[in-house]
Image: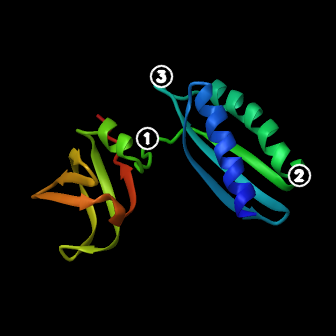
Amino acid sequence: MNEIKKSLEETLREHIENNGYELIEIDQHSLRKGIKFVLYIDHKNGIGLDDCVTVSKASEMIIDEFIDPESYELEVSSPGLDRKLTKKEDFDRFIGKTIKIKLKEKLNDRKNFKGLLTDRIGDLVVLEDDEVFEIPMDRIDICRIVPQFN
């Protein structure tokens, strides 16, 4: 099943990105009668309902080639205001934004950090709150943008 899953993810990513969208993440949840896929997509102009419908219809046709159409549910969504940052390009794109980081293990006696993303140097994320922290990307469990409301 892992080869099928990998091939499905690669095919979805290629198709979605060839149509001008970015596939940020694929979440999978077990259901009583199969799997629920949640595709998180983005676009340089943002994501609207029409984008989600377009990607959903195309993705269903692809998934149907890999999995019985009766054994899954599909949801397509924007990453939201508190989107996850996972790739180097994500961190570069959101320099200057406030982020929350939860680490896999403690760094300086802390697992949780919140502050301004000031830079990314190689595999280090530079975060500033009361002090400056250089956090190795491979130690990050989850990183999200903190929405700012004025």
Please determine whether, in this image, residue 62 is positioned above or below residue 73. Answer: above
Foreground label between 2 and 3: 2
Q: Secondary structure at mark 2?
A: loop
Closer to us: 118 or 1: 1
Amino acid carrying label 2: it is: Asp
Residue at the spot x=60%, y=40% of the render? 77
Closer to us: 43 or 89: 89
The residue identified by callout 3 is: 45
The residue identified by callout 2 is: 68
Q: Quadrant of the C terminus?
A: top left
- The numbered mark, 2 or 3, whose residue comes first in the sequence reads 3
The reply to whether discs 2 and 1 touch (Cβ–Cβ < 8 Å) is no
Mark seen at residue 81: 1
Left or right, 68 with reference to 115: right
Residue at the spot x=82%, y=49% of the render? 66
Q: Residues within 10 Å of mark 3 (few under 14, many from 20)?
A: few
